[in-house]
Amino acid sequence: MAKKRNIIVGQSGGPTSVINSSLAGVYKTAKERGFHKVYGMLHGIQGLLDEKYVDLSTQIHNDMDVELLKRTPSAFLGSCRYKLPEIHENPEIYDTIFKILDKLSIDAFIYIGGNDSMDTIKKLSDYAIIKGHSQKFLGVPKTIDNDLALTDHTPGFGSAAKYIATSTKEVIRDALGLTYNKEMITVIEVMGRNAGWLTGATALARTEECDGPDLIYLPEVAFDIDKFEKKVRELLKKKISIVIAVSEGIKLADGRYVCELSGGADYVDAFGHKQLQGTAAYLASFLGAEIGCKTRSIEFSTLQRSASHMASRVDVDEAFMVGGAAVKAADEGDTGKMVVIDRVSDDPYMSAAGIYDVHRIANNEKLVPRSWMNKEGNYVTDEFINYIEPLIRGDYQPFMVNGLPQHLVLRTK
């Protein structure tokens, strides 16, 4: 009797509006390639350590469920932010993981996530090689931050950029409707700790009928609050409504986050990341006090990563593609790798799945090139816009029930 081949997949880190499209790609491809069971870790590697998992065939019953899953935001299986210790620090935790994998007859372990998740794939694949385990470990990229190395872009980024650009246009229209002989400054805060890809996406709001944001500040360039105030004052001499986009992670030259000026960023997660919030609120308050006009702050917050109704078709399709490519790579013997998206052509836009050693990716951040920002560091260039524009194309309409989008919901009881 042939040995049963099983696969397990998990989701980790901050979710995106297309992370479940990658999960759908893993599931469908695994079934097509003859894997017996596809298990889902509940809340990633942290849940697996507690032996929390589900047979995905009990959740996904037909092709309609696959399509519904592709349109479902957040992490269907539940996510986590759990940092595996270094192997030499706690080998027992790795023994526990591999005992569970052996118990479930797992051949391939797929992890959908960002930089920290790729660190998990790196450590597990290294341990498997050291101890002679046969399981294959593959990473599937996922992050709205678009900061993973070696991939042209990451699934989740295009849809978040589409939402951000759309919302920026709407905020600009809203501000224009409220200004009559009365100046107003709007500061929009966009996610982005060290990389400003998402904040730069606000420039897409500059269209034939919209001027777009007036200023864009990314964390790749040190923020000078005095120059910032001076620039805003100059703009107010020319127009009555000013809209400014800032990354949550912009820093002063001395390394302090701008949000820390108001006493924020006290919480630190398992990976040593400070929780960033209040950057726009601080800057709006600062400008209001210094300039003496009406100001307001807007945080797009988690809406950036959960707005599946605004998902890009390119993004959904590529997320599905990389999930399937990870299964194919594992089935063909690859391990310790991450699937990447290679840009094949700009006009027409085309992409393909590639694969790279995860050791070249884990713990490396891809930042916005300085040459893709203007000299003053307060806007992005056309090269940035040309890079991002193809990624927001197309729509993936939700399945609507009574006027609202329908989602696939995990049911474990």
Image (spheres, grey):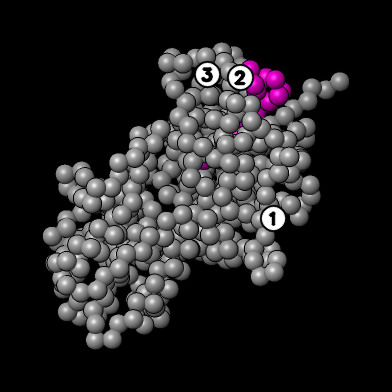
Q: Which dot marks residue 98?
A: 2
Give the labeled residue for mark 1: 68
Give the x, y percent position of residue 281.
29, 60
Give the x, y percent position of residue 10.
60, 36
Under mark 3, the amino acid is Ile
Determine the secondary structure under disc 1.
helix
Quarter of the image where the C terminus is located: top right
Among numbered discs 3 and 2, the one appearing first in the sequence: 3
Under mark 1, the amino acid is Leu
Marks 3 and 1, how far apart in space? Answer: 36 Å
**Can residue 246 be seen at all in this image of the molecule?**
yes
Residue 4 in magenta stretch: no
Badge 2 density bin: few <14, some 14–19, many ≥20, Cα 10 Å = some
Among numbered discs 1 and 2, the one appearing first in the sequence: 1
Q: Which portion, as a residue range, is magenta?
A: 98-113
Q: Are marks 3 and 2 in contact (CB under 8 Å)?
A: no
Residue 348 horizontal side relative to residue 403, left or right: left
Quarter of the image where the N terminus is located: top right
Give the labeled residue for mark 3: 93
Among numbered discs 3 and 1, the one appearing first in the sequence: 1
- Nearest the viewer among 51 and 163 is 51
Image depth: mark 3 or mark 2 in front: 3
Please give the name of the residue rendered at 66% of the width and 56% of the height, measured from the top-left corner.
407
Total numbered circles: 3
